[in-house]
Every structure is written in structure tokens, then in C-alpha cells.
Image: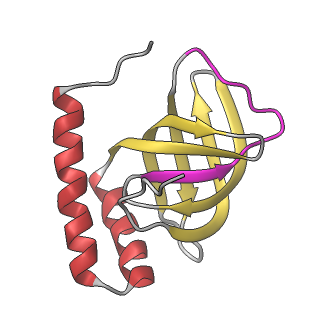
Amino acid sequence: MSERRRFSRVLYSTKIHMSQGNHHWHSELIDVSLQGALVRRPPDWQHGETLDYHLSFHLAGSDITIHMEAELSHLDEEKLGFYCHHIDIDSATHLKRIIELNIGDETLLHRELEQLLQEHIQHSKNPPTMS
């Protein structure tokens, strides 16, 4: 299977809160990127009617919380993968800093930010449809 990721993922283990409508779960964040997050699948997790979720997690040693609106993009028995389709500017700034500190390549980070912007523009022009 070929690698489809185009964004640097950073291992970042912390507790995460996921919600969808009236459903709420707590789990563990495995890794995060500018494009989304990989989360350990909670034992009581059940797929809802939509693919849209709200994810939030605290940055270690601070009162900063990252919030993102995400779409479930893949799942297996142990993990849930989410594609971030909306993130507020404060969360994006903090997430960018986490990735910047971990990948150590500012040029790569800026290239990924440009690519992310292009994907969000394209996504807003052509939203995905459910089959």
C-alpha cells in the first residue's frame, strides 16, 4: 500500500475529547498534523449518522486547548483517523508551533501550510459527497 500522507505527523500522546451531536468520548491522541489527527478508538465508540466530529485536546503543561472540526476519514479496530476541515486561528497557531518544534524544518512546514491552504480552498469549492 502506498503512503498517501502529504503532511508531517507528530507523535503527541495526550487525552482527547471527541464529540458528535449528543455523543461524547474520551480517548488518547496518537499523532497530529496540520491536516488531522489519529486517535485511539474508545471501547464504547459507535459511528453516528454523520462523519463530522469535534475534537479537542490540551497541550501538556499549559492551559491551551486545540479545537478542530474533523471528518472521520478511516477507522480500524484500534484507531480512528480524522481529516481536519476547520480549525480556529488560535488552535491553528498552536498546532503549527507544535509541528514546527517537532519537524525542525521551517521550509517543509511552510510548504505544508501552503498545501493545506490549497486543499481547504479546493475542499470548499468541491465538498465531498456521501455515496
Residue 90 image-quadrant placement: bottom left
Q: Is residue 42 magenta?
A: yes
In terms of depth relative to the viewer, which is nearer, 6 or 62? 6
Q: Residue at x 53, y 73 (%)?
A: 62
Tally of numbered discs: 0
Residue 22 position (above or below residue 107): above
Q: Which residues are magenta?
A: 36-49
Furthest-front residue in this view: 1
Question: Looking at the image, is 11 positioned above or below residue 130?
Answer: below
- Residue drawn at x 27%, y 73% is 109
The residue positioned farthest toward the right in the image shown: 43
The color scheme shown is secondary structure
In reply to whether residue 72 is colored magenta, the answer given is no
Residue at (25% x, 53% y) in the render: 116
Q: Main secondary structure of the magenta part?
A: loop
x then y, percent, for residue 91: 37, 57
Q: Residue 15 appears in which quarter of the rendering?
A: bottom right
Q: Quadrant of residue 22?
A: top right
Figure quadrant of the C terminus: top left
**Residue at (33, 24) in percent of width and height:** 128
- Residue 38 screen position, x and y as percent: 58, 53
Q: Residue 73, percent across and down?
A: 51, 37
Identify which residue, 78 or 15, lies in the foreground: 78
Q: Nearer the viewer, residue 109 or 66?
A: 109
From this view, report whether residue 90 is shown above or below residue 74. below
| Above or below, 22 relative to 122 | above
